[in-house]
Amino acid sequence: MSTIRNILIGAALVLAPLSSACAQAFPDKTVTIVNPFTAGSVSDLLARVLAEKLSAKWKQTVLVDNKPGIAGTIYAAKAAPDGYTLISTSNGHTILSALNKDLPFDPIKGFSGITQIASVPVVMIVTPELPPKNLKELIALAKEKPGTLNFTSAGLASSNYIAGELFKQTAGVDIVHVPFRGTPEQLTSIMRGDSQLSLAFLGNAVPFITSGKVRALAIASAKRNPALPDVPTFAEAGMPQYQYDSWFGIMAPAGTPAPVLKKIHNDIAEIIKLPDVQTRWQRIGAVAVVSNTPAEFDTVIRADADRYGKLLRAAGIMPK
């Protein structure tokens, strides 16, 4: 046994400097950031800012490859674990296995967290034709006419799907989920009056709220947002128990060397602190997340998978 142990220790001592050298040389070719959402989505916009800055920092091309839906995540999961294929995703990633049976990968064990990059508040918006003028009136209408109102999302496993499901259970209402291909499509549906409400991302929703194309009832944040000073928080609107953090982050296929993960993390952390990046984040309603290490991000991912798994089981969407 001691001989085997000595061999393993010796191998580790040999591989350690090789792994470190690999990280120092990284990257020496094109890096691809897979975005499993449509162009123009929050995940896409965040990824493109990072791609631009990382390209300049690394002196290598960094591309954003939009592959909407589960196919994009599968593509990233099956990529070589070398740091050259990353994925820009949201907390919706944590419920993929709950919503998709017989996946060819494990969404939690199949990826390594690199870092969270932003948190984006969601805003309860409704079509202007809907009678309720505040959150209490909306909940009262939903309870008066169960199953007649619907909420949109950018698809199953999207952040605003989780936000909507959480609202259903917290408010105790029966509203129907209508998934769309992406963020632009779901907002268009609300504006046309085809759908009634959505927990939409702040940056996407602000232009339509200020133009009167949709009406905002509450924002899921600790305090009012300067972009929407007249929109109350959920607590102010009478629903303090509704709390939701919609985060976005960068991951890599499981097995990517720790030194490579650390290098990507450190470089992204530096980029997020740049004043112009902070400004661009603010334009889309994003709050920067910094100093979130790979290990800390992995902890967040596992905790959310457990939390939202319980949420979906309570909703009857996955077995108890």
Image (cartoon, rainbow, N blue to C red):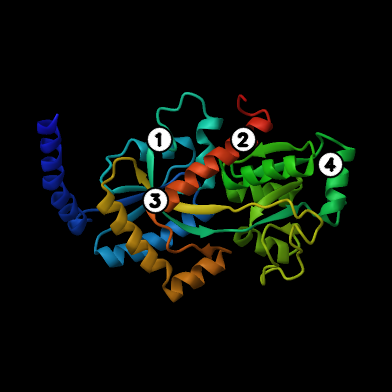
- Is there a contact, CB below 8 Å, between mark 2 and mark 4? no
Classify mark 4: helix, strand or loop.
helix
Q: Amino acid at mark 3?
A: Ala
Q: Are marks 3 and 2 in contact (CB under 8 Å)?
A: no
Q: Going from the N terminus, do you reach mark 1 or mark 2 first?
A: 1
Foreground pick, 156 / 287: 287
**Marks 2 and 4, the one that precedes in the sequence:** 4
Rendered location of residue 286, percent (x, y): 55, 63
In the picture of the structure, the residue carrying the numbered disc 1 is: 74
The residues bearing labels 2 and 4 have C-alpha atoms spaced at a distance of 24 Å
- Which one is earlier in the sequence, the residue at label 3 or at label 4? 4
| Visible residue check, residue 41 | no
Q: Which residue is found at the position 25% from the left and 60% from the top?
A: 60
Q: Amino acid at mark 4?
A: Ala
Q: What residue appears at the point 79 percent right and 36 percent down from the top-left corner?
A: 174
**Residue named by callout 4:** 142
Determine the residue positioned at 35% across, 58% down. Answer: 265
Q: CA distance from mark 1 to mark 4?
A: 37 Å
Q: Is disc 3 placed on a helix, strand or loop?
A: helix
Residue behind mark 2: 310
Q: Position of residue 171 (x, y in %)?
A: 78, 44
Instruction: Reply above or below: 174 against 213.
Output: above
| For discs 2 and 4, the disc positioned in front in the rendered view | 2
Residue at 11% across, 46% down: 14
Q: Nearer the viewer, mark 1 or mark 2?
A: 2
Q: Relative to residue 306, is residue 220 depicted above or below?
A: below
Q: Which residue is mark 3?
A: 295
